[in-house]
Image (tube, helix red, strand yellow):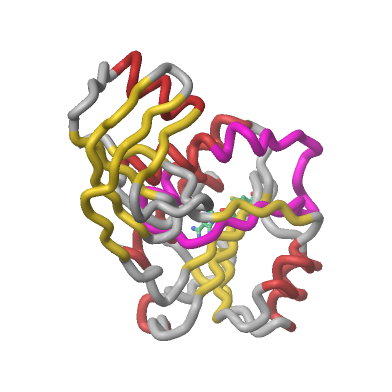
Amino acid sequence: MNVFYTESDHGIQQQFYLEGQEARHAAKALRLREGDEVYATDGKGRRLKGTVTAISKQRVVASTTEIEEIPRPSPGITLAMGIIKKRDRLEFAVEKAVELGVSEIALFVSDHTIKTNVREDRLHNIVLSAVKQSLRVWLPQVNIYDALDNVLAEYNQHHKLMAHEKTTQSFQNKMRTEDELLLMVGPEGGFSDREVQLAGEAGSELVSLGKYRLRAETAAVTFLARILS
Ligand code: SAH
């Protein structure tokens, strides 16, 4: 099943639109025709079904036949990840995090982050495709922070777990599932002592993901898979 993304700001009770690359994909690659059924999500919890009434490469118009509203998954889980230098690895982590059901992603310039540019436009497209691919209906936000300090301040109400290879504390028994969670993973060089201390002062627990040292993106996927599956 193909699910498209539609902007819902104009209201979707009567009809919804696929625009830009969504319209191109529907019209060119999938060759949708007038009268065809089409499925979409607005990324804000709505799953839509409609019938195509007009189609061009710029815009597909569908008349809405069904709207299903799905509550935001609770408790929300945020992945905070130190920005890593290899863009494809960072993008992999973001894609898998969305597939696994993360609610928000906070990328931060860690003390050990090697200076690099994050392509937010590419990340947005990756998040969008992963949402559609995994048939999710909530689009996770990706926000970028200058330092872990700002992430901890933003998520100060969350229960915080920091993945750290120097602890033996396994987290499985300590999960309090009713809490919103902030999961922190360091960049290639790991967290600095300053960051570990800061996280501790903010009430974070250090947790192990096993006895072997994982790459940052593997750690992110493992962490989320253990909590979300
Ligand atoms: N500090 C290390 C490697 C960091 S690995 C060094 O440079 O030698 C990148 C991140 O993945 C770490 O900061 C940590 O958050 C996470 N990580 C990797 N292996 C882990 C493990 N076994 N347990 C918990 N976290 C781990």
Q: Does the magenta stretch include residue 113?
A: yes
Identify the image quadrant of residue 67. bottom left
Above or below residue 143? Residue 29 is above
Quarter containing the C terminus = bottom left
- Give the residue drawn at x 26%, y 41%: 39
Give the percent coordinates (x, y) of residue 14: 34, 50
Identify the image quadrant of residue 121. top right
Identify the image quadrant of residue 38. top left
- Give the residue drawn at x 55%, y 30%: 88
For ligand 1, the image quadrant comes to bottom right
Give the percent coordinates (x, y) of residue 130: 40, 41
Give the percent coordinates (x, y) of residue 33: 23, 21
Is 141 left or right of 18, judged from the image as shown?
right
How many numbered marks are there?
0
Which segment is the magenta one?
96-124
Above or below residue 199? Residue 228 is above
- Give the residue drawn at x 37%, y 76%: 172
Nearest the eye: 75 or 227: 75
Q: Is residue 79 magenta?
A: no
Quarter containing the N terminus = top left
